[in-house]
Image (spheres, rainbow, N blue to C red):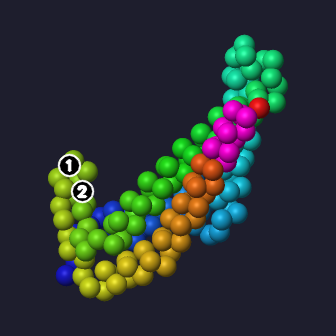
Amino acid sequence: MQCPVPPEQRPLREYEQLLESWFFVWPAHNFSELVRPLATSWLLLAPLTVLVASGSWVMRHHPAQLVLAGLVAAVALPILLLVRQWLGWTYVHRRLLSERVEYEESGWYDGQVWEKPLAWRQQDLLVAQHQVQPVLRRLQQAAMLAVILALVGASLCQAL
């Protein structure tokens, strides 16, 4: 039986496309390769958020609180990047685990469903369990770290 699903819509190919993407590959290998670009994005946004925080009349008189508020606000970008990565990886994970593949033949909202053969299901299940789940765990760990940093920073900001 020939597969009617266009090659670019097959779950295994979608997984490979994530690995080829400069953005989605960050969490694919190890935690440090994920944290490095997130920290870079945070540091690049921090001067702008500190500048915005300096518009507060109250904070102008408390420089430590001003800088801390800007740094906490800058955590929003890494969190948004993590959310986008989470959405992409969970989408592919769900498609790999599914017994059926939903696809568009012509791209004009003519959705079809194709039942995966047993061999495809087994291969997709292995990829989902051994390749994608570790990525999702790393994304979850990074998100928890970012949220903890934001909460600790906000608490310190209140304490100052």
Contact between labelled residues 2 and 1, with CB atoms less than 8 Å apart: yes
Amino acid beneath label 2: Glu
| Residue pictured at 60% horizontal, 41% vertical | 77
Residue at label 1? Answer: 109
The magenta region covers 149-159
Is residue 74 visible in this depiction of the protein?
no
- Residue at disc 1, secondary structure: loop
| Residue pictured at 55% horizontal, 51% vertical | 82
Picture coordinates of residue 101, whole percent (x, y):
26, 67
Is residue 129 visible in this depiction of the protein?
yes
Residue at label 2? Answer: 104
Amino acid beneath label 1: Tyr
- Disc 2: CA contacts within 10 A as few (<14), some (14-19) or many (>=20): some
Quadrant assignment for the N terminus = bottom left
Up the image or down, 12 lies above or below 58; here it is below
Quadrant assignment for the C terminus = top right
